[in-house]
């Protein structure tokens, strides 16, 4: 063999590559699927104008309520909206969206989301479970794969907003989404006013710094419970409130009165937002209608589109939209 | 607070121009010493730790940072060395420009760790 860098081709030689072993073939198929999914994620990123992550440090603060509320409130504006329920082990968005027991439609290897109230598209692990009592017991890597599939293999179509609902905490799920889905606008942190929830919310805020994603704002849920009633006009009513306080109200000329009980204290969300220098989007009242609506599958915004909770959500959405900019930094020259 | 219209990175400081025409300079050392992240902020609670942070910042090479816009409310700075985590609200930068304490004299308390 000469030292020439030029190679010659013998047309009579057998060039057929050796057949791949089943393991090699499987690896190649997996690599191909992974590559296809990655390309699909980038494509999805372009088709969805705005992507918003909804997080909380603590469980039970009403993240799914806020996620569904934001989605429905945006849909009320006539926008096309989707919700991605990333809470793999405790998915409850479908129930709140009236999609209990639904199954997803799969066509040509693409998953088609279910359509809930006001046409909001929904993808959730709940659609894949045999029954709602079936627990999902998965280790991290399997969860990660499922999340990537939920992002890359779903046929969302063109959306104005995708709301992504996470399980509580700052673990695998938000990290995976933040690293897989391009151009996320930022995150909304949900909290309740009490100190324990606030401590955990602060974790979520500092978590956003690690992910290099902006905090679009803090929402304080279960902020106050308003009691209304009737009494003789002009009469004074005293109500025993939490922490041994007494609240007083005077019935108006029509004999109506109302007082707001701050069941879990008040204003903590706002002060946390101020402390961290992130926007405060607003407070949502404690509304037992959410519990009933969640159980019955008729969201409060759907059953009472003009009610106090729908109004509060509309205000929060307006504040959120102010934080989302189509052209960040327009008008600011950086040299 | 007027809207920031220009952010000019110079050798050791940044020249800020606001929509009302006002101009301010903020040194990179001041900017880095006032980093609002959860790691740097507690270091400003005590005088000695704050001075120590200042010394560390001043020992870093003088460099122009990469600037990223965060939402429509803040800027983030990326340096080749030292902390790049902080998200600087425009209000915070305005305080620095006007030589005011951006922490408003309040000690930082966090529940993050």
Image (tube, coloured by chain):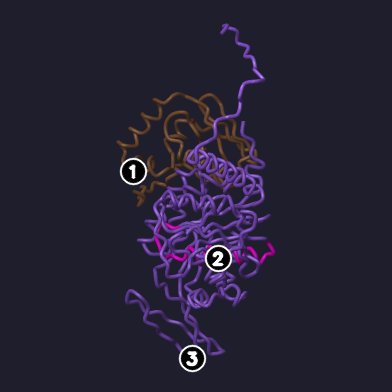
Chain colours: A purple, B brown
Q: Are marks 1 and 2 on the same chain?
A: no
Distance Cα–Cα, label 1 vs label 2: 40 Å
Q: Are marks 3 and 1 on the same chain?
A: no
Percent x, y of residue A132: 46, 70
At 65% from the left and 38% from the top, the residue drawn is B21
Residue topped by disc 2: A68
- Residue A60 part of the magenta-drawn span: yes
Percent x, y of residue A62: 46, 66
Percent x, y of residue A189: 48, 57
Q: Which chain's residue wears label 2?
A: A
Distance Cα–Cα, label 3 vs label 1: 53 Å
- Sequence-wise, which precedes: disc 2 or disc 3? 2
Residue topped by disc 1: B45
User: The residue tagged with tag 2: helix, strand or loop?
Assistant: helix
- Residue B64 part of the magenta-drawn span: no
At 51% from the left and 33% from the top, the residue drawn is B26
Question: Which circle, 2 or 3, is nearer the viewer?
Answer: 2
Dot 2, crowdedness within 10 Å: few (<14), some or many (≥20)? many
Which range is magenta? A56-79
């Amino acid at each position: 063999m000469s030292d020439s860098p030029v190679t010659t081709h013998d047309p009579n030689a057998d060039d057929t590559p050796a057949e791949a072993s089943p393991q090699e073939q499987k690896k190649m198929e997996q690599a191909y699927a992974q590559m296809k999914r990655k390309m699909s994620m980038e494509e999805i990123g372009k088709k969805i104008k705005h992507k918003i992550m909804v997080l909380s440090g603590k469980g039970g603060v009403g993240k799914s309520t806020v996620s569904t509320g934001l989605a429905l409130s945006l849909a009320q504006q006539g926008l096309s909206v989707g919700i991605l329920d990333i809470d793999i082990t405790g998915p409850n968005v479908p129930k709140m969206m009236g999609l209990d027991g639904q199954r997803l439609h799969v066509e040509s290897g693409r998953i088609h989301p279910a359509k809930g109230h006001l046409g909001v598209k929904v993808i959730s692990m709940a659609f894949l479970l045999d029954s709602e009592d079936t627990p999902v017991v998965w280790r991290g890597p399997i969860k990660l794969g499922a999340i990537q599939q939920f992002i890359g293999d779903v046929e969302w179509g063109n959306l104005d907003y995708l709301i992504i609902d996470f399980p509580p905490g700052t673990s695998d799920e938000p990290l995976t989404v933040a690293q897989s889905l391009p151009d996320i606008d930022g995150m909304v942190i949900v909290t309740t006013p009490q100190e324990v929830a606030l401590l955990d919310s602060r974790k979520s805020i500092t978590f956003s710094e690690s992910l290099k994603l902006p905090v679009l704002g803090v929402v304080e849920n279960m902020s106050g419970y308003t009691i209304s009633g009737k009494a003789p006009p002009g009469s004074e009513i005293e109500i025993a409130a939490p922490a041994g306080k007494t609240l007083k109200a005077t019935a108006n000329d029509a004999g109506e009165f109302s007082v707001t009980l701050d069941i879990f204290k008040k204003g903590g969300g706002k002060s946390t937002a101020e402390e961290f220098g992130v926007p405060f989007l607003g407070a949502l009242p404690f509304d037992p209608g959410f519990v009933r609506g969640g159980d019955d599958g008729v969201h409060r915004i759907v059953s009472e589109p003009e009610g106090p909770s729908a109004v509060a959500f509309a205000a929060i959405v307006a504040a959120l939209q102010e934080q989302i900019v189509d052209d960040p930094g327009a008008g600011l020259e950086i040299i | 607070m007027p809207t920031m219209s220009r952010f000019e990175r110079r050798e050791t400081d940044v020249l800020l121009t606001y929509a009302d025409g006002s101009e301010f300079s903020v040194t990179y050392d001041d900017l880095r010493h006032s980093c609002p992240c959860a790691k740097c902020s507690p270091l400003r609670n005590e005088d000695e730790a704050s001075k120590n942070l200042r010394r560390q910042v001043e020992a870093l090479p003088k460099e122009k940072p990469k600037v990223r816009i965060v939402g429509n409310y803040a800027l983030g700075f990326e340096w080749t060395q030292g902390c790049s985590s902080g998200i600087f609200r425009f209000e915070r930068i305005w305080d620095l420009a006007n030589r005011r304490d951006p922490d408003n004299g309040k000690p930082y308390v966090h529940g993050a760790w």
